[in-house]
Image (cartoon, helix red, strand yellow):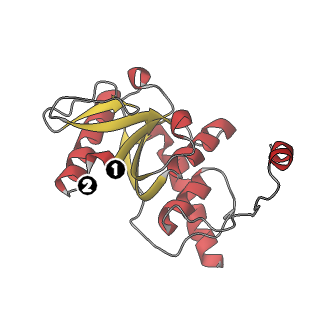
Amino acid sequence: MKSLLKERSLHFAAGHLHQNCRNTKSIGEETALLSGFNSMPYRVGQVAGLAVDYHYYDSAAQQCSILSDVIRRMLADDIKSSDIVVLSRNRLENSGVANCDGGTDFKLVEGSAADRSRIRPIRFATIQAFKGMESPVIILCDVVQVTEREPQSLLYVAMSRARSHLTVLVDQRVKPMIRECLLRKLEILKKS
């Protein structure tokens, strides 16, 4: 890519980004640690922000119920539906939240699909499709593994899309691994 750019452009600027400018400090730290980094790969921003909000489920039905509650609470707190994106490693029809029913409050829609009803659309996308984009609020669902290389890279992409608020819906069986990552965060913070 660099050689193509050099061929086609006489002048261009190149630089290295060493500070996380997208996420709050809380989101940046937990994104790095859940993604398998032993230390921070970048300087985190100075805005502390809200803590990452974890919810644990043990069935698809419970995950749907949690997602509905979280979205309704956000909408009641005057967060615009256009500022909320639900991400999963799976397409909507294969996701544990496929049957999520927002009733008259909201409706999950894939991508930027237009919805002509009066029900507020909440965008749903796969992590892969949302790579390179961002949103003020991200709700990550279907987290069933955090220790393997591929799930960690997907976690990094998904979690780092959130600018100010991140909610993560995690399978109950993953709770011990999440706890380990958070304890590692405390150890790193003690050293700094």
Q: From the viewer's perspective, is 45 left or right of 107?
A: right
Q: From the viewer's perspective, is 74 left or right of 189?
A: left
Residue 131: % across, % down:
56, 41
Residue 177: % across, % down:
55, 48
Residue that mark 1 sits on: 83
Q: Are marks 1 and 2 in contact (CB under 8 Å)?
A: yes
Is residue 101 or residue 1 the one in the foreground?
1
Could you tell me which residue is drawn at 59 percent across and 40 percent down?
Answer: 154
Query: The disc labelled 2 sits on which kind of residue?
Result: Ile
Query: The disc labelled 1 sits on which kind of residue?
Result: Asp
The disc placed on residue 79 is 2
Dot 2: few (<14), some (14–19), or many (≥20) neighbours within 10 Å? some
Quarter containing the C terminus: bottom right
Q: Where 179 falls versus 81 (above or below)?
A: below
Could you tell me which residue is drawn at 14 percent across and 34 percent down?
Answer: 118
Is residue 118 or residue 105 the one in the foreground?
118
Residue furthest to the front in view is 10
- SS class, disc 1: helix
